[in-house]
C-alpha cells in the first residue's frame, strides 16, 4: 500500500485547467521534489493534497483511506501538514513563545484556564526537543521579527513539527535565502526525512537542491505530469530538458 496516492486528479478553476490527470504514488519515507515552471500547478497540487480545496476530478488516498473531500483541519489530525510560500509565525513573540503556543495547541492545552506542573514540564521538554531538532536553541529568547528570514523559516518548521507530521509539504522552503541559510534549510529537510522519518514533498526552484536531496522528482508542466523519476532519470529525460530545464539548467544541476 502506497502512503499517498493521487489517481487521475484534476482541478479546474472555471474554464482554466490548473491540473489534469495527475496520477502519482509517494511511498512512506520518501523525500519527493515537485518541480516545474511558474504556473505549472505545483501549489495547486499542495492545495489538493492538504484539503484546501477538493479536486474537480479523481481521488486521493492517504495511508489507504480516501481523503478527497476531507477538510484541512482533519488532515492535520491525520498528519498532513504544510507550509506556505509566506512564512507564518508570530513576529512580535519570541521563538520560545512561538514554539510554546504550537506545542500547547498540539497537546490540547491551549484553551485550558490553567495547566498542571507536569503538563508545563512536558511542554518545556517538547519545546527543547523541537528547538534541538531545528537547531534554534541559541536564539530561543530572541523576538522572531528580529531574526533573519532564514531563521524565521526554521522557526516555522519547528512550529509545524509540533503537530507531529507524517507527511510534510514544504512550498519553496529556501525561497529568498542566502547561501548559508539555504545550506541550513537543506540540511534540516534532509535530517527531518532521514532522522525523524517524515515523508516530505517540497516545491523547489533551485535545481542544485532538488538534484542534491530528492529521492524522486515529479515534474509538472502546464498542469500536466511531464515526468517522474530519480535525479539521474530526470536529468536524462529529453522532454524535461526541452520543456523546462534546458541544457544549461541540467548541466548546472547534475
Ligand atoms: N484559486 C485559484 N483560482 C483561479 N486560478 C488559480 C487558483 N489557484 C491557481 N490558479 C491558476 O492555476 C494555475 C497553476 O497555478 P499554481 O499556483 O498551482 O502554479 P505553480 O506551479 O505553483 O506556480 P509558481 O511556481 O509561480 O508558484 C495558474 O494558471 C494559476 O493562475
Image (cartoon, grey):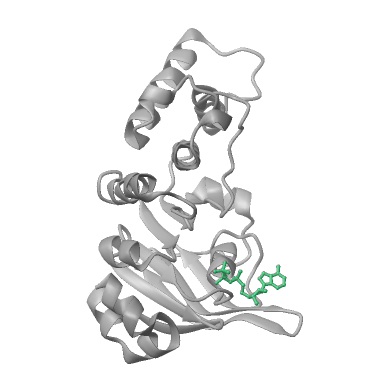
Q: Quadrant of ligand 1?
A: bottom right
Q: Is residue 40 visible?
A: yes
Estimate the x, y position of residue 186 in percent, counting from the top left. 33, 51
Residue at 66 percent across and 77 percent down: it is: 56
Tell me which corner region of the image, top left, top right, bottom left or bottom right, holds residue 34: bottom left
Nearer to us in this view, 117 or 180:
180
Q: Quadrant of the N terminus?
A: bottom left
Measured along the vertical axis of the image, is residue 174 above or below residue 242?
A: above
Estimate the x, y position of residue 87 in percent, counting from the top left. 56, 45
Nearer to us in this view, 97 or 180:
180
Q: Is residue 63 visible?
A: no
Measured along the vertical axis of the image, is residue 94 above or below residue 159?
A: above
Horizontal side, residue 210 vs residue 56: left or right? left
Question: Count of labels shown?
Answer: 0
Estimate the x, y position of residue 236 in percent, counting from the top left. 26, 85
Q: Quadrant of the C terminus?
A: bottom left
Measured along the vertical axis of the image, is residue 220 above or below residue 69?
A: below
Residue at 63 percent across and 73 percent down: it is: 55
Q: Residue furthest right?
A: 14
Horizontal side, residue 246 vs residue 51: left or right? left
Estimate the x, y position of residue 84 in percent, counting from the top left. 56, 53
Amino acid at each position: 500500500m502506497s502512503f499517498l496516492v493521487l489517481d487521475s486528479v484534476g482541478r479546474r478553476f472555471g474554464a482554466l485547467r490548473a491540473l489534469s490527470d495527475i496520477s502519482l504514488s509517494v511511498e512512506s519515507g520518501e523525500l519527493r521534489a515537485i518541480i516545474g515552471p511558474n504556473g505549472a500547478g505545483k501549489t495547486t497540487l499542495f492545495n489538493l493534497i492538504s484539503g484546501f480545496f477538493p479536486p474537480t476530478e479523481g481521488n486521493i488516498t492517504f495511508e489507504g483511506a480516501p481523503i478527497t473531500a476531507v477538510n484541512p483541519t482533519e488532515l492535520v489530525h491525520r498528519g498532513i501538514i504544510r507550509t506556505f510560500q509566506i512564512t507564518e509565525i508570530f513576529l512580535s513573540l519570541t521563538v520560545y513563545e512561538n514554539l510554546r503556543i504550537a506545542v500547547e495547541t498540539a497537546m490540547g492545552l491551549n484553551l485550558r484556564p490553567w495547566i498542571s506542573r507536569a503538563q508545563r514540564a512536558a511542554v518545556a521538554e517538547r519545546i527543547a526537543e523541537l528547538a534541538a531538532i531545528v537547531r534554534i536553541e541559541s536564539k530561543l529568547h530572541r523576538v522572531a521579527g528580529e531574526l533573519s528570514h532564514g531563521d524565521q523559516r526554521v522557526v516555522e518548521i519547528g512550529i509545524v513539527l509540533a503537530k507531529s507530521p507524517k507527511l510534510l509539504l514544504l512550498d519553496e522552503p529556501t525561497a529568498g535565502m542566502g547561501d548559508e541559510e539555504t545550506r541550513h534549510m537543506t540540511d534540516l529537510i534532509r535530517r527531518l526525512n532521514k532522522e525523524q522519518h517524515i515523508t516530505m514533498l517540497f516545491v523547489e526552484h533551485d535545481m542544485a537542491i532538488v538534484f542534491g536531496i530528492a529521492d524522486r522528482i515529479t515534474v509538472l508542466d502546464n498542469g500536466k505530469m511531464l515526468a517522474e523519476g530519480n535525479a539521474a532519470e530526470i536529468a536524462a529525460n529529453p522532454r524535461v530538458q526541452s520543456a523546462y530545464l534546458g541544457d544549461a539548467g541540467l548541466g548546472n544541476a547534475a
